[in-house]
Amino acid sequence: MVASEAAPFAKTGGLADVVRALPRALARLGHCVDVVIPRYRGIEAGEPMAPVTVPLGGQVAEATIHAVADAGVRTIFVGHPGYFDRDHVYGAAGRDYPDNPERFAFLSRAALEWAASSGERYDAVHAHDWQAGLVPVLARQFMAHALRGVPAVFTIHNLAYQGVFDASWLLRLGLGWELMNVNALEYWNRISLLKGGIVFSRLITTVSPRYAREIQTPEYGFGFDGILRSRSADLVGILNGIDYDLWDPARDPYLPESFDASRLEGKAAAKRMVLEMFGLPADEKARKRPLVGMISRLVDQKGFDLLAELSDELPQLDASFVLLGAGELRYEDFWRALAARHPERVAAKFGYDEAMAHRIEGGADLFLMPSRFEPCGLNQMYSLRYGTVPLVRATGGLRDTVRNVDPATGSGTGFTFDEYSSQALLTTLRRALGVWVAWWLGGWVVSNLAT
Ligand code: ADP
Ligand code: GLC
């Protein structure tokens, strides 16, 4: 597998969780998986191995190689001081590094060179997202001998990120001009590395069945629906799983007390801790109020424009709100201002904080994910595991994982709404809060957690 992130070494979103969890799950099924990621600044893990020579656009550079094995999975780190020894993974101050095509072409080529020199015989090469989109392209173009006949699988974790660059990159990366072709990398007179992954792979997967269908429509296809429809026979949606070794309230080191379906006191302790750490009131009255949590990249995809339209309504609800997020400054500004106006009800923390993410999953009563689109989404699944009721827009993987509660029978696992509007979100929030106390008393959360 080749990817730009893998937890715990480098993570900006769910891709990293999946690139950690999936190889381990495959290893448990008896497969041997090598995962190749960049050796970004700060990664200390791994023993040094022989470097590999990486030709790229008429130049030849050396990639250092480090390797570490854990839980049956070997992780290979590709190092290069110019490309990967930087402050950030993709870019600084909201702007991508301008040489990202070169950085990730280097990763892709180095991964293949390493695989060819490793002496292993691989059954498949699996590339994730646009950053690894050149892996299947290069495997066909340059590695005919070493990886001959090895089929490529490409996984789309998020079609919104397409790796589109000026066509002049083709020559700079040493790729033939024949790839500037509508059946290859060409995309509206530019090139797309995501398209390379889609076109040159034997199979294409994405991270939920629903999203696999959605991305073949103009509404969710982001210009790629035609390309994906032309490959629909080879496109399959496989729902992500989550790693219960890392996300389990019964043995989560970040929680003040462990809990499970039969011992829910620990959940109350986590709630109190979250309220206190966010500086919200934590007296008995405040603790009885439902706590609505959010952990998210602060980007359009996640529905923050809907929440922004509800700045007057949210604080009127009988609930407390906590947000942990990193991303676009305009959304940070919005939440900072909202929290300043309503310090008793709304609090936000900005930046990346793994421990706090676990505590919010543990302590919140409702988890909010009103995404405009969502390929899979992991936090709603973590929420289900932590007895935290998800409230989501029924799109993509959210639709596949959260069953709307049926008021007549009480069955279901959360609250969903269809229309992408602030009114639909507000109505659903009111619905959830309206029945929260009754369900809590009736033990609904307990049975939800147990299933
Ligand atoms: P996406 O990959 O689109 O961001 P997912 O729901 O698939 O969405 O995965 C997000 C992952 O990133 C989850 O593990 C979530 O806990 C984590 N995460 C997002 N933002 C933060 C943050 N600010 N601090 C800690 N973890 C975060
Ligand atoms: C992407 C998607 C998210 C998905 C994750 C892991 O970042 O936005 O929905 O869960 O990849 O596949």
Image (tube, helix red, strand yellow):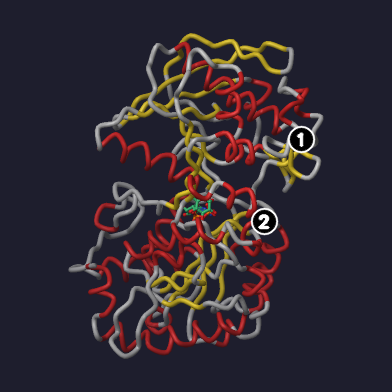
Q: Residue at x 47, y 57 (%)?
A: 376
Bin the neighbour count of mark 1 within 10 Å (Cα to Cα): few under 14, some 14-19, many 20 and up: few
**Mark 1 within 8 Å of ligand 2, using the beta carbon:** no
Q: Amino acid at mark 1?
A: Pro
Give the residue drawn at x 63%, y 55%: 225
Number of numbered labels in the structure image: 2
The x and y percentages for residue 42 are 54, 30
Q: Quadrant of the C terminus?
A: bottom left
Residue pointed to by mark 1:
98
Between disc 1 and disc 2, whose residue precedes? 1
Along the viewing direction, whichever of 214 and 368 lies nearer the viewer: 214
In the displayed structure image, the side of residue 266 where residue 146 appears, left or right: right
Q: Going 69% across and 71% down the picture, which residue do you hit? A: 337
Question: Is residue 358 shown left or right of residue 170?
Answer: left
Q: In this picture, is 134 found above or below 164?
A: above
Q: Position of residue 139 (x, y in %)?
A: 55, 23
Q: Position of residue 384 (x, y in %)?
A: 34, 65
Q: Position of residue 184 (x, y in %)?
A: 67, 35
**What residue does disc 2 label?**
222
Alpha-carbon span between mark 1 and mark 2: 22 Å
Q: Residue type at mark 2?
A: Phe
Q: Give the residue at x 31% y 41%.
A: 25
User: Element type at marker 1?
Assistant: loop
